[in-house]
Amino acid sequence: MRADLSLPVADLVLVGGGHSHVQVLKSLGMSPLDGVRVTVIAREAHTPYSGMLPGYVAGHYRWEDIHIDLGPLCRFAGARLIVDAVTGLDLENNAVRCANRPPVRFDTLSVNCGAAPETFADAGVPVKPIGRFLPHWRSLCEEAGPGTKILFAGGGAGGVELALAARYALPHGVEIGIVTLELLPGQARRAQQMLADELYKAGIELRFGTVSAARESELVLADGTTVGFDRLFWVTGVVAPDWVRDSALSQDSRGFARVDACLRSLSHPRVFVSGDVACLNGQERPKSGVFAVRAGPVLAANLRRSAQGRALRRFRPQKRFLSIIGTGDARAVASRSGLAVRGRWAWRWKKWIDRRFMERFQNLPDMAGAPTIGNPGNGVDGKEQPPFDPMRCGGCGAKLAAGPLHRVLGRLPEQRHADLVQGIGDDAAILRGQSEQLLLTLDGFRSLVDDPYLFGRITAHHSLNDIYAMGAKPTSAMAIATVPLMTEAMMEEELYGLLKGAVDVLNGDGVPLVGGHSSEGSELSLGLAVTGRAVEPVLTKAGCREGDRLLVTKPLGIGVLLAAHMRGQAQTRLLQAAIGIMDQSNREALDVLRAYGVRAVTDVTGFGLVGHLGEMLRASGTGAELWLEAVPSLKGALEGFDGGASSVLQEGNEQALADFEIRGRPPGDPLVRLLADPQTSGGLLASVPADRAGDCLGALLAAGYANSAEIGRITAGSNLICPRRPD
C-alpha cells in the first residue's frame, strides 16, 4: 500500500466497481494522484466480469475466477472502499446518497455501475446485477431435475450464451427455452446461423414474440399465447438504475446519462460516466462490456487530467469489434465484420482474452512483503526485538500487549477513594453514587475499516460492551475523535460520518452522546467514555462456579482476518462477514444471559478468549476445560493462520496459553491459536449454570446470535484445552 504523498485537498468518488473503474484503480496504484483522496462505493466487494459469467454457469470457472476483489485493488490504489448501495445523487451539494450511511461528498464523481435488464413486475430473476443472480443459479443447480423448465427472456448474445451454458451444466431432463423477438440482433448473419444450429442441437426451444406481461409461472406474449416456466431469468435489453434516472444528470430517453466524447456529463462537468449506464452523445453504441473495457484507460486519464486542470482526452469507441460467444461445451463462435467461425480454438481464444484481463487486477504486487522500519535490537526486557512493521493492526489488535500493560499498572500507586467500589481489573469501574452504583469505562482505537461511519458504529458497540459485560445499563457517552488533516470541508464530513455512526448505535441503545473533544492527527481514531447504571445483581468476572458451562455469543477470528486482509491474503467478502459480527450489539445477548441465571461474564476483546477467560478464572478461583472443536470461528480465520497472518497482539496473547494443559493438538495448531486472537467488538463470554445452559444457548440463537456456542465448563482448579467435548 502506497504512502500518502500530500494532504488530501479533493475527493474523487467512484460509484461502482465496473470494467472501467477497475482500470482507473489500477492506474492510480501504478501512478498515485497527488492531493486527491479516492473513495469507491460499491454494492458488493467483489465485482464480477460479465464476459466470464456463462463460463461459470457451464462449470468451466470457479467463483474466484470471475470476480475481482475490490479490497486489495483499492488498497493498491490508496483508495477507501465503502460497501453500500447508492440510492441517489445530490448534485446541488455534490454528494452521493447511500442506503446505509450518510451521504458521501465529492469534488469529482465517476459512475461505472452497469445497468439492469428490463423486467415485468416481480416475476423471474434479472441476470444483472450478477451478484444477485448467482445465488439463484446455485439454488437452481441443487433443485433442478427432470421436467424442470428454465426460461431465458432475451435472445441476444447474453441470453443465447447463458442458455447454452445452462444446457451443458444441468441434467438432460431439464427443459430450457428462450423467448425473444429476434435472435442475436446485431450479430453477423453467419454467426446467427451457427448459434441457431447450436441451440437446435442442444434441444433449446425458441419462442419468438414480444413479452407483454409476466405472471408467477408464465410469460404472456403480445399475440396472447403463453409460455410456462419453473424458473425465469431476464437477459433482455437494459435500463438505467432508478437513482440515475431520478437524478438531474442529462439523460437520453431511457434514462442513461448523456456524456461527451471525454466521458463527462453534458450537464454536470464534475461527473464522469462510462459503461452501460452511459450514452455517448452522437456516438451511441450497443450496451456491451467491451466498450466499458475500452473506455477504462481514457476514463483513468481524464480523471487524472481533470484533477490537474489539464485538457481531457477523447474516447472513440470502435464501430466493429470481435464477438466470441461460447456454446457451453468448451467451444465458441467468433465473428467480426460479417465473418464467423466456430470451434474449440475459439473458446481457448476467449479464455485467454478474459483471463489476461482479469489477471491484471487479481495478481497485484505482494502486500505481504511490506517493508520494515529499523533494525532488530534489545528491548527493555533484554530480549531481541524484531524490526517495526508499519502495517500495524487497527481496532483492538492495536492495543498494548497484556504483559507491558500489567507491568505499567503495577508500577502506579494504588488507586483508592471512598466512592470507589471496583477499580482497575474488571470491565468497568464501579463508583458509589448517592442512590445507586455508577459504572464508568473508556475504550477506543484507530480506524480498522475504510468507512468512517462504519468505524464509528463498531467503536460504539465495542465501548458499550464493557457496560453490558457487567450486566449494567449504559446511560451516557462522551467522545474523543482525531481526524486526519485535510481541507476543512473534508474534515467536517469525516468527523460527521464518524460521529453519526457512533450516535446511531448509542441512540439505538438509549444512550445520548453528551460531549467530547476533537483534534487533528495523523490518522482517524475514536474513543468513547461510557457511563452506566448498575443493575442488581452486578455481574463481574468473579462469579464462576464449578460445573458451570461456558457460552460465547460471537465467533472468533476478527484479529487474524483483519491482519490477513491488510496483507492481501483474505478475500474482502470474508472481511465483510467479520464487519457484520463487529456491527452487532450484545445488548440482547445480555438480556438472554440474565434470564438464564448467568453467574459471571466478560466481553472478549484485545487479549483474546483465553486471556479474558484467564481473568475470569483468577477472579473466581476456579479452572476451566475448553473444547476446541466447539469454539466458533469466522470463515477464513483458520486459513489466515495457515497463511502466516496474525495480529500484532497474537504472540503476546498466546502467553496466556501457558496456563492451560493442551491435549490432542500442538500449540501452533490454528484452532489453539484462535483462542488468543484479539477481537474488536467481540462477543460475551459467560458462565451459566449447567442445567440452564442448553436452553440459554437456544435462546441466544433465537435472538439472532447465530454463532453462539457452548465451548467448555468450569472446573475445580486445573485448566485444560482438549479437542472436543468429552462424552
Image (tube, helix red, strand yellow):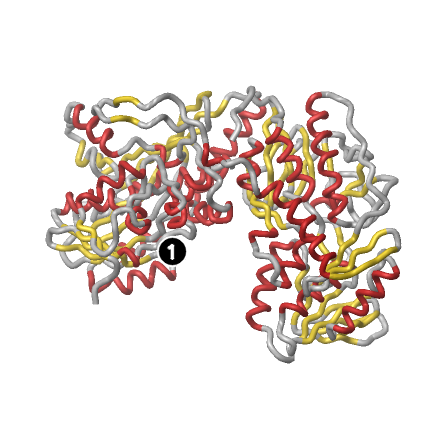
Identify which residue is drawn at 40% across, 39% down.
460
Quarter of the image that includes the C terminus: bottom left
Query: Helix, strand, or loop for circle 1?
Result: loop
User: Relative to residue 623, is residue 422 depicted above or below?
Assistant: above
Residue shown at 46% from the left, 33% from the top: 369
Left or right, 148 with reference to 692:
right
Which residue is drawn at the image coordinates 34% and 34% (left, top)? 443
Q: Is residue 416 visible?
A: yes
Task: Give residue 284's position: percent from left, percent from top.
Answer: 85, 44
Would you say 268 lies left or right of 79 here? right
On the image, the x and y values in percent for residue 612 come to 24, 43
Q: Position of residue 403 (x, y in %)?
A: 22, 32
The image quadrant of residue 646 is top left
In the rendered view, would you say 440 is above or below 134?
A: above
Amino acid carrying mark 1 in the image: Tyr
Q: Position of residue 319 (x, y in %)?
A: 86, 45
Q: Which residue is mark 1?
A: 705
Report the front residue among 248 and 556.
556
Query: Is residue 119 visible to the viewer in this orientation of the structure?
Result: no
Classify mark 1: residues with Cα within 10 Å, few (<14), some (14-19) or many (20+).
many
Which sits in the foreground, 515 or 376?
A: 376
215 versus 40 height, above or below: below
User: Would residue 607 be found to the left or right of residue 200 on screen?
Assistant: left
